[in-house]
Image (cartoon, grey):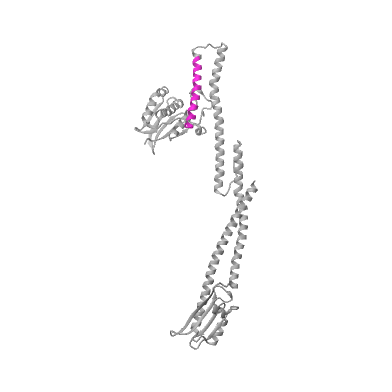
């Protein structure tokens, strides 16, 4: 698989290079041909102009000097041209004929020997504004390419062919080189995702590439693996915790029923009350789990209304104040008035009751609780800080998870189902808010809730 991928990448690079080289070759040839044609046309016209100027400058009433005539005949300047110079009586003074050109027919018919695009120019020769003769110059309009021009074009074509060969070689080398860095991490990512799909969460992508995007891909796969592993561990622990929470009241109920059946105990009011409390505990656990799932799945309608955070906090505090009094917990408040948030009265009461109840449970006698309410950056802030045992730093990231207990012994004397803070977090986030916790062990614990202000 690895070799096949490398081969495909190499082949694709070669094909891309070939297409690029062919395209560049075609464009280069067209451009060079046009430029070369324009160059030859310009050169031929320049030669025509030079011949005309030369004859004009050396011709007078006495004709052309014999030495000039001989020089003209063998001059490279006249090569490829038919030149005819006549005086006013029509006598031919100079005649230069191209090789195999049949100049007479050209001059008479302007198309001799069936040659196409033959051009004849007739120019009057003057001296002191008096006509003293006539020049006829004939040449083929088709471009005649010499050896130097042919050599030039051959060199250009050779350069293009050599460039193509070198480009293909470079493409193969680079294809093999880059395929090593591209295909290997891709194959490893594929194998890792296959393992993850089969439940193997202990595997991760180890290969690192020099390509930024591939490194980001491998980092994403590894993050996905860690997330799945965390979720899997949470699911296992949640199943274990639910089993534990259900097992305890069911065990109590079973033991009491067996004791009654064996006539060890009598079915009196006290025994029935024990049954009722354990059944209530089971009902509360099931209802809270259902409520939590409904919030997370958005099956519970979240109503947004204008809530006075200061007013509702004071109401809840007044209702449960007796709990603070019994433990002689001092309450210090710094509450700003008229802070209105976008929430729902009943749900906000549930949040504050939960937090204050926790502070009563976990604050020692003669301890302190600090309540701070204010607004900041478009949010209403509710802070609750209590002195006491605090939360271990290893437990701190998990306090909002379902059924998570920082008390490993699961002491039921403190009550609760382990779902309160998870419910608080879900409700706060449903309103677009945020909840955080800070704690120092054996010193304090502080919960900070931020909920958008009502507009």
Q: Any magenta on residue 286?
A: yes
In terms of image quadrants, where is residue 225? top right
Q: Position of residue 97 (x, y in %)?
A: 57, 80
Residue furthest bottom as drawn: 62
State the residue in front, 121 or 417.
121
In terms of image quadrants, where is residue 200? top right
Q: Position of residue 263 (x, y in %)?
A: 56, 10
Q: Which residues are magenta?
A: 272-298
Direction from residue 348 to residue 192 in the image, left or right: right
Q: Position of residue 217 (x, y in %)?
A: 55, 44
State the residue in front, 112 or 119.
112
Image: 115 above or below 417: below
Q: Position of residue 240 (x, y in %)?
A: 56, 27
Image: 212 above or below 114: above
Q: Is residue 16 visible?
A: yes
Name the quadrant of the C terminus: top left
Total residue callouts: 0
Q: For the point 48% across and 80% down, which residue is it?
A: 123
State the residue in front, 124 or 340.
124
Residue furthest left as drawn: 338
Q: Is residue 77 visible?
A: no
Q: Any magenta on residue 51?
A: no
Q: For the point 52% across and 12% down, which residue is it?
A: 267
């Amino acid at each position: 698989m690895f070799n096949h991928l490398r081969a495909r990448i190499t082949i694709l690079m070669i094909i891309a290079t070939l297409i690029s080289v062919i395209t560049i070759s075609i464009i280069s040839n067209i451009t060079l041909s046009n430029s070369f044609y324009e160059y030859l046309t310009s050169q031929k016209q320049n030669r025509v102009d030079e011949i005309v100027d030369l004859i004009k400058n050396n011709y007078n009433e006495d004709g052309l000097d014999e030495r000039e005539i001989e020089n003209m005949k063998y001059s490279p300047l006249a090569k490829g041209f038919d030149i005819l110079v006549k005086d006013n009586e029509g006598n031919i003074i100079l005649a230069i004929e191209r090789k195999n050109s049949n100049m007479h027919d050209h001059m008479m018919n302007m198309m001799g020997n069936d040659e196409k695009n033959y051009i004849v120019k007739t120019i009057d020769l003057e001296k002191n504004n008096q006509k003293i003769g006539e020049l006829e110059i004939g040449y083929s309009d088709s471009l005649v390419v010499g050896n130097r021009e042919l050599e030039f074009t051959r060199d250009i074509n050779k350069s293009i062919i050599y460039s193509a060969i070198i480009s293909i070689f470079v493409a193969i080398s680079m294809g093999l080189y880059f395929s090593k860095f591209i295909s290997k991490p891709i194959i490893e990512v594929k194998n890792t995702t296959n393992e993850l799909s089969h439940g193997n969460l202990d595997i991760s992508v180890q290969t690192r590439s020099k390509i930024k995007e591939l490194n980001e891909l491998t980092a994403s796969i590894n993050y996905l693996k860690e997330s799945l592993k965390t979720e899997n561990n949470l699911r296992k622990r949640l199943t274990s915790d639910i089993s534990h929470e259900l097992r305890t009241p069911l065990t109590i109920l079973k033991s009491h029923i067996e004791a009654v059946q064996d006539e060890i105990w009598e079915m009196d009011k006290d025994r029935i009350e024990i049954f009722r409390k354990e059944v209530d505990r089971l009902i509360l656990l099931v209802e809270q789990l259902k409520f939590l799932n409904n919030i997370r799945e958005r099956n519970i309608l979240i109503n947004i209304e204008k809530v006075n955070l200061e007013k509702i906090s004071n109401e809840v505090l007044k209702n449960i104040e007796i709990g603070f009094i019994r433990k002689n917990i001092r309450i210090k408040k710094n509450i700003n008035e008229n802070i209105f948030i976008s929430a729902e009265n009943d749900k906000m009461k549930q949040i504050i009751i939960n937090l204050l109840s926790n502070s009563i449970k976990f604050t020692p006698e003669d301890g302190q609780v600090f309540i701070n309410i204010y607004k900041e950056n478009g949010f209403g802030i509710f802070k609750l800080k209590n002195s006491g045992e605090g939360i271990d730093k290893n437990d701190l990231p998990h306090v909002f998870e379902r059924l998570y207990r920082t008390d490993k012994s699961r002491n039921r004397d403190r009550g609760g189902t382990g779902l309160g803070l998870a419910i608080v977090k879900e409700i706060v986030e449903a309103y677009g808010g945020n909840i955080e916790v800070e704690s120092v062990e054996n010193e304090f614990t502080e919960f900070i809730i931020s909920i958008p202000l009502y507009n």
